[in-house]
Image (cartoon, rainbow, N blue to C red):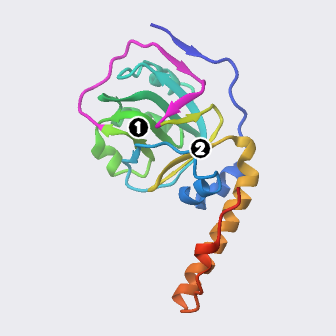
Amino acid sequence: MTVTIAAVLAPKPPASLIDGFRSAPTSVISDNLGRLPGSVGLRPFHRAGKLVGTAFTIRTRPGDNLAIHRALEMVGPGDVIVVDGGGDETRALVGEIMKNIAQWRKAEGYVIDGAIRDVAAFATSDFPCFARAVIHRGPYKNGPGEINVPVSVGGCVISPGDFVVGDQDGVVSFPAARAARLLEAVQAQVAREEETLKAIHEDRYQGSYSRSEPAS
């Protein structure tokens, strides 16, 4: 069966803008997005490492990874491989070899609404991988699938070119058009929270944290 590829790839944002989110906690990003978006049910399987990049999206039949193999011929630096596998946990969509292919292509990491295998290879690596589950059973490779289309991952719609940020708290995404303004708000909140922590440690905290709210 066929894999459909949308004709127009999303433009890449400036590297400086992407790098600005490398020190941004997903929790603070979420706060400044109204605490609404974010993929639910995914967890990190890698040892460490922050995931920051733009979405290279794939929708595949549950338990089938033909479209992912095709996408691995196309991804490159700055791409987060975002896979809508329908939340299926009965077959693994990627394993150690596909992990290494993605690294060789200099992708930023995987976000998979589905299962993986060869979990030990991910657990000893700093190559980010967020997924729903682990299972030894391998995938079908028959298709169909779609590449470079809007997908739903853990209840969150992610479009090609959206920013994707992941850390130990989970994965959050947002349109590239919002990134610059959002980064300013996130940095301001991080500064406020750092000052609050400092005040606590210096025994001069007066309850300001409960009265503060992030910018919308």
Of mark 2 and mark 1, the one earlier in the sequence is 1
Amino acid on which the number 1 mark rests in the picture? Lys
Amino acid on which the number 2 mark rests in the picture? Ser
**Which quadrant of the view contains residue 24?**
bottom right
Look at the magenta stretch and give its main secondary structure: loop
Q: Quadrant of the C terminus?
A: bottom right
Q: Write down the region rendered in magenta.
A: 134-154
Lateral position of residue 150 relative to residue 61, left or right: right
Q: Which residue is painted at 37% across and 39% down in the image?
A: 132
**Picture layout, residue 33 above or below residue 110:** below
**Picture layout, residue 69 above or below residue 133:** above
Sort mark 2 into few (<14), some (14-19) or many (20+) by Cα contacts within 10 Å. many
**Picture layout, residue 90 above or below residue 196:** above
Sort mark 1 into few (<14), some (14-19) or many (20+) by Cα contacts within 10 Å. many
Residue annotated with mark 2? 173
- Residue 99: which disc? 1
**Picture layout, residue 77 above or below residue 160:** below
Lateral position of residue 37 relative to residue 18, left or right: left
Q: Can residue 157 be seen at all in this image of the molecule? A: yes
Q: Where residue 166 appears, x then y in whole percent?
A: 51, 50
Q: Depth check: 133 or 116 in front?
A: 133
Q: Quadrant of the N terminus?
A: top left
Disc 2 element: strand
Q: Residue furthest bottom?
A: 203
- Tell us which disc is closer to us: 2 or 1: 2
Q: Where residue 206 appears, x then y in whole percent?
A: 60, 86
Q: Which residue is painted at 29% across and 36% down in the image?
A: 117
